[in-house]
Image (cartoon, grey):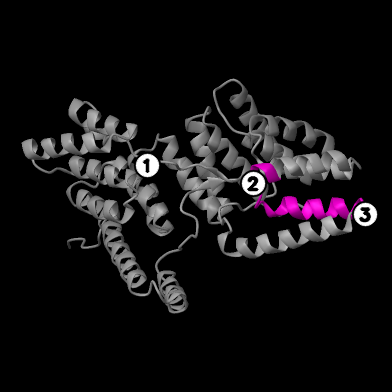
Amino acid sequence: MTNLAPGPGQQLRTRIGFACGLIQVRDDFRQWAGTTPGVFSIVCRMLATSVLLIGVWLSHPVIAFGGAVALRGPLAQTPSSTGNDRRFSEINRLIDSGDLARARILLAEEVAARSETYQTLFLEAKILFREQRYRESMKVLERSLSLNQRDAEVFKLVASNAILLNRTDIAEQALKTAAQLAPNDYLVFFHLGALYYTDSRFPPAQPVLEKSVNLNAEYIPARLFLGLTLEELDQEQSAVDCYLQAIQLAERSEFKGEQPYLYLGRLLYRQSKLDESFLYLQKAAKANPQSCETWCLLARIHGARGRDTEAVAALDQCIQADPKYSEAHYLLSRVYVKQGRTEDAAKELSQFQELKKLEKNLKDPRKNQRATP
């Protein structure tokens, strides 16, 4: 008997088409209800509830670790079967460099000369992705998948679009398919593990992130995400080792960022190892003087050591970097109370409360770390 069950690619194309339809309904309604925010809010909640039947919508458009963006552009490069074609490689290079107009011209010439293929559709979808036209990019990828379901690069671009369209169900399936087609691609496993982490699915995140690290031991973001996951699984010593390895890699490479130092310093702070934590947090502040989380942790340690002047100086650094960072205002109010500055304390506490109200609907669901005590 013939097996009529759809394959993974066909199932994914069906879900992409359904997702595009839902997004179109949402956008059409937004245009109609733009002047009636109350009604719009109610119906959007109803729509979101119905979407939960087929997948999870996230409120933040990019995968991030501790506030640092892990997905800034599409995962996909030139389709693997066209790697030796100079024409496609040049179009891809232009897309990556941001010269989308020139890329479109060359792509149009290619289609005119050789007709439309899954590779040209892929490149068209990548241009649309760069233009932040994610819904249109997904529609083009649906057409590409109808011609070829064996290229991992197409599924990787599907995942990138799906993440930015708040469709983690599609992103997960696309990344799993890409992993089957490209079992040695460390980035596929990294982003799948990051997706599990941000969805608070820590047990399945661990082996996938370990696979990414094994495939590319030099890739620092995978080690950082693995460390965060191990913390959530109460494997704190393994997390410490992970962060130390990330620091070693960062110090002998061109990695720019405070995360390896910050994450280790934060974990040591939670373990009440304040002196060790302080050393790493100082390095984090040097790596990124704009990191408010770093300055607030430093202020907490200064406060615990009775160094109120240094604590205020650290919090001033944070507020200079981001005046709307609520925790800094709360910590300042506590220091001012200790110093007897009642009016200043009340002012900072009031500002903290106002900022927390604004943050309620802007929380980053991808930062799953337990609250700092």
The kind of secondary structure the magenta stretch mainly shows is helix
Q: Is residue 371 above or below residue 153?
A: below
Query: Label 3 belongs to which residue?
Result: 340
Q: In this view, does 257 lie to the left or right of 160?
A: right
Label 1 and label 3: CA atoms lie apart by 53 Å
Tag shown at residue 233: none
Outermost residue, front side: 343
Residue 32 percent location from the top left of the image: 33, 74
Q: How crowded is mark 1: few (under 14 residues within 10 Å), some or many (20 or more)?
A: some
Is 1 a magenta residue?
A: no
* Residues tagged 1 and 3 counted as in contact (Cβ below 8 A): no
Q: Tell which circle, 3 or 2, labels the residue nearer the N-terminal end.
A: 2
Q: Which amino acid does label 3 sit on?
A: Gly
Residue 165 percent location from the top left of the image: 39, 57
Tag shown at residue 322: 2
For the residue labelled by badge 2, is the local secondary structure a helix, a strand or a loop? loop
Q: Tell which circle, 2 or 1, labels the residue nearer the N-terminal end.
A: 1
Query: Label 1 belongs to which residue?
Result: 74
At 62% from the left and 37% from the top, the residue drawn is 259
Outermost residue, left side: 113
Q: Residues within 10 Å of mark 3 (few under 14, many from 20)?
A: few
Q: In this view, does 66 lie above or below 258?
A: below
Q: What stretch is highlighted in magenta?
A: 319-340
